[in-house]
Amino acid sequence: MDISGASSVGSQLEIKSLQLAKSQQKVEGQATLELLEAAEAPKVSSANSAIGSNVDTFA
């Protein structure tokens, strides 16, 4: 039985697994950035700046 060969295969599989995980993280990160860029904050503007400056509350 060749133990060093099995160890080498295990190491290769571990490296490939880590490479796939890194690739997946890059893809998810890019998708997150695209989503954040697409979610633009709504622009709120009013012709009258006094509108909404007072809040009436009743107890």
Image (cartoon, rainbow, N blue to C red):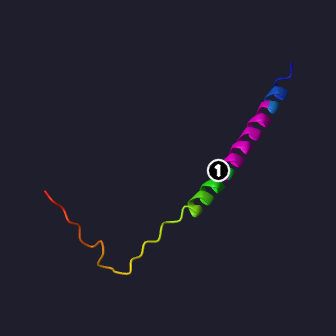
Identify the magenta region: 10-26
Residue extending farthest top: 1
Q: Quadrant of the C terminus?
A: bottom left
Secondary structure beneath label 1? helix
Please provide percent x and percent y for residue 38. 59, 62
Q: Nearer the viewer, residue 29 or 34?
A: 34
Decide: few, some or many residues near mark 1? Use Cα within 10 Å; few <14, some 14-19, many ≥20: few
Q: Nearer the viewer, residue 25 or 51?
A: 51
Q: Please say if 30 is above or below 20.
A: below
Please provide percent x and percent y for residue 30. 65, 56
Please provide percent x and percent y for residue 58. 15, 59
- Apparent side of residue 1 relative to residue 18 in the rendered image (left or right): right
The residue shown at (67%, 52%) is 26
Residue extending farthest left: 59
Q: Quadrant of the N terminus?
A: top right
Find out whether residue 20 is within the magenta segment. yes
- Apparent side of residue 56 relative to residue 5 in the rendered image (left or right): left
The quadrant in which residue 7 appears is top right
The residue that label 1 is drawn on is 28
The quadrant in which residue 14 appears is top right
The residue shown at (56%, 60%) is 36
Find out whether residue 12 is within the magenta segment. yes
The residue shown at (69%, 46%) is 24
Please provide percent x and percent y for residue 18. 71, 41
- Apparent side of residue 16 relative to residue 1 in the rendered image (left or right): left
Please tell me whether the stretch drawn in magenta is mainly helix, strand or loop.
helix
The residue shown at (79%, 36%) is 12
Q: How many marks?
A: 1
User: The residue under label 1 is which amino acid type?
Assistant: Glu
Q: Nearer the viewer, residue 38 or 56?
A: 56
Q: Please say if 55 is above or below 35.
A: below
